[in-house]
Image: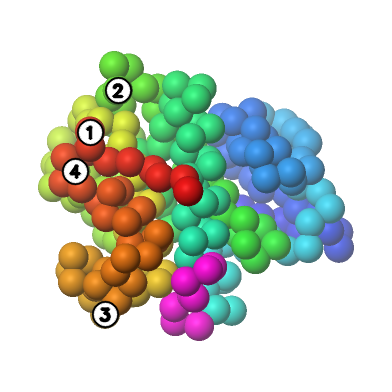
Amino acid sequence: MKINKLSKSKYKIESLVRTNILRDLLELFDIRSYKDNDNEIIIDKINSLDILEDWEKTQQPLIDYIAAEEMFDNFAAISLYLEKIGMQLSHIDPTKLVVINNNIFIPMNLEDLYIIKKNKITIDNPYSKENIYLPIELQENSTIPYTVHFKCFYSSLALLIYDKIIGIQKNPDYHVGLKVIFGSRLYWILRYCLLENAEERLIVII
């Protein structure tokens, strides 16, 4: 993934797959974009666009509770939209995540987007075991192709949010780490997304 700044408020993202779906995700957040060709998309009239790593440099080690809720709601909207059209991402890839205007997060790993069939997705694209947001099922897997419940994505999302509000390296045991926000909306959201049985996981919008 490559981001070029064309003008004060115009950016080009190169080397993408499934560009039409990316445009739909941008429109979901009312971001203006237009197609340049099959492997590029131009985003217009925005203030800033960064990859996650660069955005993190502008933040404190952890984000606050409200920001974490907003981040979850951002990805929940994307997840529910994808499920509506019969697809789902297998996981969040932090190396392929862009941040628009400092608060809108768009996943660019669309090669990890799969068609849902009977509540399952079949993963046939290799993935990195070094990804700290890898779903529980994929952490333990060593074969490709691999079929899992489409809700495996929920645990990847929960691990991202957990890392940003609590810190995975500081508290790798999320059962313990989440106690600091026990009883809050976000506590229950993350607990439901991290259930061991993927079929029982829920994205709760309150």
Disc 4 marks which amino acid? Answer: Glu
With respect to residue 185, does 196 lie above or below?
A: above
As drawn, the label of residue 176 is none
Magenta stretch secondary structure, dominant? loop
Disc 2 marks which amino acid? Answer: Asn
Distance from disc 3 to disc 2, alpha carbons, whole Å, reads: 34 Å
| Residue 105 place in picture, x, y as percent | 57, 54
Q: Earlier in the sequence, mark 4 or mark 2?
A: 2
Location of mark 1 (residue) = 199
Disc 3 marks which amino acid? Answer: Lys
Callout 1: SS? helix
Disc 1 marks which amino acid? Answer: Glu
Location of mark 4 (residue) = 137
Q: Is residue 171 left or right of residue 28?
A: left
Q: Is disc 2 surrounded by few (<14), some (14 to 19) or many (20+) residues within 10 Å?
A: some
- Nearer to us of marks 2 and 1 is 1
Closer-to-camera residue (145/102): 102
Q: Earlier in the sequence, mark 2 or mark 1?
A: 2
